[in-house]
Image (cartoon, grey):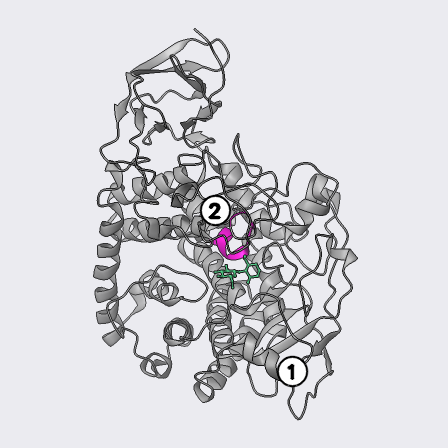
Amino acid sequence: NNLFLSENIRFNQLGFYPNAQKIAVVSADSLTKFEIITAKENKIVFSGNLQPSTNVALNGKKTLIANFSDFTKPGDYIIYIPDMGYSYQFSIKNDVFADLAKGTVKAFYYQRASMALPEKYAGPWFRNAGHPDNKVLIHPSAATEKKPTGTIISAPRGWYDAGDYNKYIVNSGITTGTLLSLYEDFPSYVKKINLNIPESSNKVPDELDEILWNVRWMLCMQDQDDGGVYNKLTNAFFDGMVMPEITKLPRYVVQKGTSATLDFAAVTAQASRIFRKYETQLPGLSDSCLNAAKKAWDWAIKNPSMSYDQNSMNNKYEPKITTGGYGDRNFTDEFIWAAIELYLTTQNEKYYTAVNILPDERMPLPSWNNVRLLGYYSLLRNEAALKNNQKTDAEIIKKRLLKMANDFIEGASSTAYQTVMGKTNRDFGWGSNANAANQGIVLIQAYQITKDKKYLDHALSNLDYLLGRNATGFSYVTGFGSKTPMFPHHRPSAADRIKEPVPGFLVGGPNPGKQDGVALPSMVADEAYTDSMNSYAANEIAINWNAPLVYLVNAIQALQYE
Ligand code: 9MR
């Protein structure tokens, strides 16, 4: 038999827990058998029949499914399919996602602005500091009487948003909230994560130390005079594909906004609650966060509809700003999120009653412009302490969340890749991979509520999707898997001297939108992906895509050992 590597055998390239479902998907027809063989001795340890999928894939074709869930013996293996070839090597073991779980959090360290990353922590991706951001200009759009155009403020630290070097509050908000929620849901697990970052030797969990790098920046984005928060700290235009220390363009804070200010309020309120327990290590931090949250809230109540409309801003002011907009026009969800976090932290009902917490029955999957569920998750995770209306609301939300989870899993096992992600074309827009991760988070919440294992299994199916059981055969996380993005749209990865991109980053993923104008190999929604540097609409990395992956993989690791 001709034995060669076939990329058409699609599965989670990191591997499987011994007792989890184990599925590989083959995009081919008319093959019948598969075998699991040991990686070293090529000994057959399991054989089975390939079963055609119930439904067709988005490309109209059926797939063949190799299900070897019954094989549970830890070890290193490959899949062999007669007349096709053999697969990448994978493991069956406990803790199989431990390195990935850590690596996705460590990715945030690599995104740190304003500091050098020494080899000791960054390995081969060590680099010089960029963007000190201690001399940032007030853009005319943000000028006030007390801080006229050109006033210099300092707002260092924070994470670069994505492949670019700008820092956007709206996107930082959802990202930081998602990361804080991992800690709030699984504190004892998170405490054990060791990231090898400069703060690793202090007595604060590494994940919280990493989050703090960004929270400290966020705090600087609030105008102390009125409590409002600037939308972003940015160049006027995107940098070239260069290392951070090369770019010396002036940096601005622009226009305050309602979304930015409410996202900021939600994050600082949640951070205050969490950092309260680390008062000894971080004296005063919790109070500072809470004061900031309250001031931001008050500003938003006075300015309830200040959208960030970059185009009309550019008609009025110079220099024109052409970096990311994150321009949101609907603030209902930001009000819900901020109200819930402030209420939970202060126990003051005035925040809760100021907003209609359940304006309609919708449960929109989280994205930078829709953060309603982040508030709902927080309400549920703090349910034990709720009283009165809040308790009644939580019961309603719980029902809706379970319905959402049930809708996700309905029919998922009949699809071509047997994953929740990708049942319809609607899953695939800009940053589709984050949808897979966010669907996984919904399913983890459903599992936490019900302890019904099916939700956890389906959450895992979306991790399987992200790590290779999908229509392109890519594991979409840099450095994790056998076929991974090598040319992400990420300035440091492109400009450093290292062949391998900076590891631990989820790329945006299939997106037929082609907003970057880069040709794609296919316009079928789940195949619309290319591993090319210029494709920022399919192959960029971003903190708001990494954060839900951090949550998903770490929650799965945490729950595996409950
Ligand atoms: O992820 C964002 C996507 O939802 C928007 O449609 C798009 C256009 O506004 O912007 C994306 O975010 C980018 C941001 O504006 C700038 N940094 C890189 C982000 C990822 O592409």
As helix, strand or loop, the secondary structure at mark 1 comes to: loop
Classify 28 as above or below 266: above
> Where the C terminus falls, by quadrant?
top left
247 lies left or right of 31: right
Q: Amino acid at mark 1?
A: Tyr
317 lies left or right of 24: right
Classify 110 as above or below 466: below
In the rendered image, is residue 562 in sight?
A: no
The disc, 2 or 1, on the residue closer to the chain's N-terminal end is 1
Classify 398 as above or below 312: above
Q: Quick one: which residue is furthest to the top in this view?
A: 1
Query: Which x, y percent locates residue 215?
Result: 58, 66
As helix, strand or loop, the secondary structure at mark 2 comes to: loop
Q: Residue at x 64, y 45 (%)?
A: 196
214 lies left or right of 37: right
Query: Which x, y percent locates residue 557?
Result: 42, 41
State the extent of the magenta-drawn residues as a range. 538-547
Which of the numbered marks, if any, corresponds to residue 509? 2
Query: Which x, y percent locates residue 222?
Result: 59, 78
Pointer 1: what residue? 317
Which of the numbered marks, if any, corresponds to residue 218? none
Q: Nearer the viewer, residue 457 or 530?
A: 530
Was residue 122 drawn as part of the magenta stretch in this picture?
no
Q: Amino acid at mark 2?
A: Gly
> Where the N terminus falls, by quadrant?
top left
